[in-house]
């Protein structure tokens, strides 16, 4: 008899249309592969050599203000530039390129060099959310911008180039690949059912209670049925909003509490500053109405068995399709039972 908990199978990612291979039995194999060095996470609250600390000189020679709350500025080494001219290149349909303009910004979460999101208060995180919203609204007023990606890379293992806790916003003149996929899938469901894909999915997950990690009045955090990364999670708004710009104050306060609790659970898993890439997915802008779109936020953490063993996307994952060993249900149960209070706060050493 086929059993999701025991036998290899594929799962459909309803947001992208992609398939994921799940191989639960592989968690029994011994590990003799790469073991990561634990990153040193002892940092001062202020570093005179940090490009992001208040009052310090940045890499381009400009100076940060003596900011006391979340601070945003245009990235000194932006991947996208607003001055890029419109244009395209096409040679026989085989060599094809289009110009891409945009604006990239950095968001410093706090003036404190040593405070990551889980170590901040929910009130302080709420100020970050308000800044995200303000930046989203401001960037969307530029008619050339079609999509705004708010994200964070946390930790050296995720390629973070500066240890000062910060995130980024990349706004582009076209809709990125993953957003285009999610738009198509949500459009298809909305046309067929007349309802939001994620509203219907969330209702089913709440009914089954197999992959829920956190739940409050306005948001649910869960390990999606199709998760690729070992402890991947998805935050979904209970009210269907297309973008962060539509969130009311109560929802933003609720989201701040959930972000603190979820990221604290991550740190509590292996008692380290847990690395991840996270980001909001929301409707394109300056692209007409998108009644099908439903705001959500992805967390993609790489750690697998311990603080020193990460999940690699290689071989079959690169050449065929993604694969995971630990089931989403097992990962959700592990995260759900962890405390929502950061381990340093529980022992009286919180900042």
Image: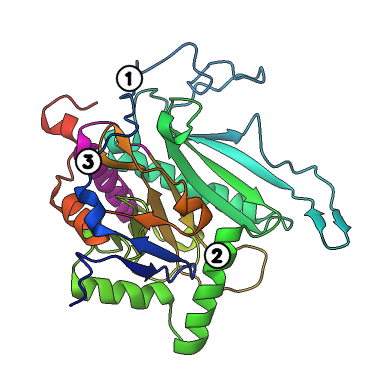
The residue at the point 47 percent across, 31 percent down is 160
Alpha carbon distance from label 1 to label 3: 27 Å
Is 91 magenta? The answer is no
**Helix, strand or loop for disc 3:** loop
200 above or below 226?
below
Tally the marks: 3
Q: Whole-percent x and y of residue 18?
A: 47, 67
Q: Whole-percent x and y of residue 169?
A: 56, 44
262 above or below 167?
below
**Helix, strand or loop for disc 1:** loop
* Whether residue 215 is visible: no
* Residue picked out by circle 1: 40
* Residue ranking furthest to the right: 91
- The N terminus sits in image quarter: bottom left
* Whether residue 169 is visible: yes
* Residue picked out by circle 3: 30
261 displayed left or right of 156: left
* Front residue of this view, candidates 21 and 106: 21
Q: Nearer the viewer, mark 3 or mark 2?
A: 3
The residue at the point 30 percent across, 36 percent down is 309
Q: Whole-percent x and y of residue 195?
A: 43, 82
Q: Give the range drawn in magenta.
A: 253-275
**Helix, strand or loop for disc 2:** loop
Main SS, magenta residues: helix
Is 262 magenta? The answer is yes
Q: Is tag 3's residue or tag 2's residue first in the polypeptide sequence?
A: 3
Q: Residue 146 carries which label?
A: none
* Residue picked out by circle 2: 283
Alpha carbon distance from label 1 to label 2: 38 Å
């Amino acid at each position: 008899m086929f059993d999701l908990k025991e036998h290899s199978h594929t799962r459909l990612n309803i947001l992208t249309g992609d398939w994921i291979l799940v191989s639960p039995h592989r968690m029994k194999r011994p590990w003799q592969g790469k073991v990561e060095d634990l990153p040193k996470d002892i940092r001062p609250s202020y570093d005179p050599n940090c490009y992001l600390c208040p009052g310090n000189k940045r890499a381009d020679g400009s100076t940060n203000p003596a900011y006391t709350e979340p601070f945003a500025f245009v990235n000194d080494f932006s991947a996208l530039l607003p001055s890029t001219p419109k244009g395209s290149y096409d040679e026989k349909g085989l060599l094809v390129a289009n110009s891409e303009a945009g604006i990239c910004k950095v968001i410093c979460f706090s003036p404190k060099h040593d405070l990551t999101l889980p170590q901040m208060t929910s009130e302080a995180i709420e100020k970050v959310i308000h800044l995200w919203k303000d930046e989203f609204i401001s960037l969307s007023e530029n008619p050339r911008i079609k999509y705004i990606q708010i994200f964070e890379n946390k930790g050296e293992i995720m390629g973070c180039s500066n240890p000062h806790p910060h995130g980024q916003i990349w706004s582009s003149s076209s809709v990125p690949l993953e957003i285009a996929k999610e738009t198509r899938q949500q459009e298809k469901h909305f046309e067929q059912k007349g309802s939001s894909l994620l509203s219907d999915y969330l209702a089913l997950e709440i009914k089954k209670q197999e992959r829920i990690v956190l739940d409050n009045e306005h948001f649910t955090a869960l390990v999606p049925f199709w998760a690729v990364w070992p402890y991947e999670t998805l935050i979904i708004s209970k009210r269907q909003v297309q973008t962060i710009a539509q969130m009311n104050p109560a929802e933003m306060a609720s989201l701040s509490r959930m972000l603190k609790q979820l990221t604290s659970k991550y740190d509590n898993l292996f008692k380290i500053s847990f690395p991840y890439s996270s980001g909001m997915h929301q409707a394109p802008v300056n692209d007409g109405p998108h009644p099908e779109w439903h705001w959500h936020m992805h967390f993609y953490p790489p750690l697998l068995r311990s603080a020193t063993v990460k999940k690699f996307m290689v071989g079959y994952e690169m050449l065929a399709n993604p694969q995971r060993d630990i089931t989403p249900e097992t990962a959700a149960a592990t995260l759900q039972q962890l405390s929502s209070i950061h381990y340093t706060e529980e022992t009286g050493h919180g900042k």
